[in-house]
Image (cartoon, grey):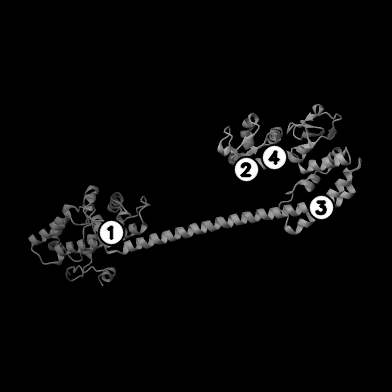
């Protein structure tokens, strides 16, 4: 039984429960509001009580003292009748305490500040449940001056800062430590003045005696406000610094990630597998195939695993179509494709297309003028070139004219305006006295460097 009693602890006594119920109208505490229906039905709350959930009991045990302290500040002694002594010596004639329900001969009349509700409390419950302010007034009222409560109300009505000075422990929460002794002196001086004023019946307020302490308290309040503002400013600065540090850390992380990504992509772009894939795709694009044929040929090219993460077949098809129509690759619609890859494709396709254009120009020139061929040989070579000019169809009449061009051409060379412009330029670029065959030695400095 003793072990069970030790395990069964009382969380809330009936007197404490009753005090919370009476104080409840002045306590805007949501957690207490949720518990109040159960507290009204059950005077005692123990650890074994099954009418409350485990979390509710834990909440009650954790906040019980704070709620009782808040309730004690909600009451004050009744000024017109702060206490009364029952004239009868018979306990059956005594009134009962509103909290413990025991008969009390010395009645203390207290009132709820919020709504003026009056109750009678015994001296023990006053000491147990009521505030330091009320116990202070109770002592003076019973020992020195029955009218002390009324005088105190008059004084605090004119000087509402007096209760804060005397009873509010955290009245100046931000006051620097070096000013705490001054606060103690103000509290002691104010208490001595107020006590002297309350111990005798009088209608004259101790304004002269209070004035120095009130001035000093006002000064301390100003210091407290300044310290609070500085603390808030420091908190904001710390929060701003923390946010800035977090942003910098995030920025560094992004930069590191981007650098790692750029480094990885640079390794991909410099790899032999990528360069081989790029050369094959570039050759397909320069052929200016139909989209379906382009994709069919593209499927035959082995794609390095690293390149698969950079571009797909659809995006390459869009770029091939763009090159076929515009002669270059911008890929503005494909923002997710790395710009380095787009630049590589654009540069390589344009360079290869220009080289093929020069080769075709030279081949046509050699077949038409630059080589000593029989008419049959000339016609055969020109026929082979009809479909190889960058995938574009050249009118058949141009080839027929080219087959007879050497026999009919005169100096200076006059090229029909209907012929393709690159062909016109190539045929006109000749010495005045003879035909010089094209050697087709189109090697660029970049190609030489790669070869080396």
**N-term mark: 3 or 1:** 3
| Residue 322: percent from left, percent from top | 30, 52
| Residue 86: percent from left, percent from top | 85, 30
From the viewer's perspective, is 218 left or right of 20? right
From the viewer's perspective, is 439 left or right of 90? left
Marker disc for residue 62: 2
Q: CA distance from mark 2 to mark 1?
A: 77 Å
Q: Is there any visible trace of residue 154 in the rendered image?
A: no
Q: CA distance from mark 3 to mark 1?
A: 90 Å
Q: Residue at x 44, y 61 (%)?
A: 256
Residue nearer the viewer, 324 or 126: 126
**N-term mark: 2 or 3:** 2
Q: Is there any visible trace of residue 271 in the rendered image?
A: yes
Q: Which residue is mark 4?
A: 68
Mark 2 and 1 residues: CB-CB less than 8 Å, in contact? no
Rate crowding at label 3 as few (under 14), some (14 to 19) or many (20 or more) other CA atoms within 10 Å.
many
Marker disc for residue 349: 1
């Amino acid at each position: 039984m003793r072990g069970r009693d030790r395990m069964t602890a009382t969380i809330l006594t009936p007197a404490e429960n009753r005090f919370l119920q009476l104080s409840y109208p002045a306590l805007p505490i949501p957690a207490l509001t949720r518990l109040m229906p159960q507290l009204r039905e059950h005077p005692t709350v123990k650890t074994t009580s099954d009418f409350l959930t485990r979390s509710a009991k834990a909440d009650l045990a954790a906040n019980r003292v704070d709620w009782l302290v808040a309730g004690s500040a909600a009451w004050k002694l009744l000024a017109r009748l702060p206490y009364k002594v029952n004239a009868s010596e018979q306990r059956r004639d005594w009134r009962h305490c509103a909290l413990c329900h025991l008969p009390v001969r010395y009645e203390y009349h207290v009132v709820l500040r919020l709504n003026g509700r009056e109750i009678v409390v015994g001296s023990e419950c006053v000491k147990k449940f009521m505030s330091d302010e009320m116990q202070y007034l109770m002592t003076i009222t019973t020992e020195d001056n029955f009218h002390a409560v009324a005088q105190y109300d008059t004084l605090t009505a004119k000087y509402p800062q007096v209760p804060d000075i005397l009873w509010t422990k955290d009245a100046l929460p931000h006051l620097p430590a070096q000013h705490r002794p001054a606060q103690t002196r103000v509290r002691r001086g104010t208490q001595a003045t107020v006590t002297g004023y309350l111990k005798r019946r009088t209608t004259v307020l101790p304004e002269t005696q209070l004035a120095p302490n009130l001035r000093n308290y006002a000064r301390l309040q100003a210091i407290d406000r300044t310290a609070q503002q500085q603390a808030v400013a420091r908190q904001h600065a710390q929060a701003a610094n923390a946010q800035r540090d977090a942003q910098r850390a995030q920025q560094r992380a992004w930069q590191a990630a981007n650098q790692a990504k750029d480094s990885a992509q640079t390794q991909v772009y410099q790899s032999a597998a990528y360069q081989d894939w790029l050369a094959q795709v570039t050759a397909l694009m320069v052929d200016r195939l139909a989209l379906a044929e382009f994709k069919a040929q593209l499927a035959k090219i082995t794609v390095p695993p690293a390149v698969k993460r950079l571009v797909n077949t659809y995006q390459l098809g869009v770029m091939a179509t763009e090159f076929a129509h515009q002669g270059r690759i911008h890929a503005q619609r494909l923002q997710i494709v790395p710009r380095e890859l787009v630049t590589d494709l654009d540069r390589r396709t344009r360079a290869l297309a220009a080289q093929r254009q020069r080769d075709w120009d030279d081949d046509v020139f050699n077949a038409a003028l630059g080589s000593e061929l029989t008419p049959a040989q000339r016609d055969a070579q020109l026929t082979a070139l009809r479909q190889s000019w960058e995938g574009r169809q050249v009118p058949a009449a141009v080839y027929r004219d080219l087959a007879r061009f050497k026999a009919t051409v005169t100096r200076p060379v006059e090229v029909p305006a209907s012929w393709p412009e690159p062909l016109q330029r190539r045929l006109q670029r000749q010495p005045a006295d003879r035909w010089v065959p094209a050697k087709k030695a189109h090697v660029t400095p970049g190609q030489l460097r790669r070869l080396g």
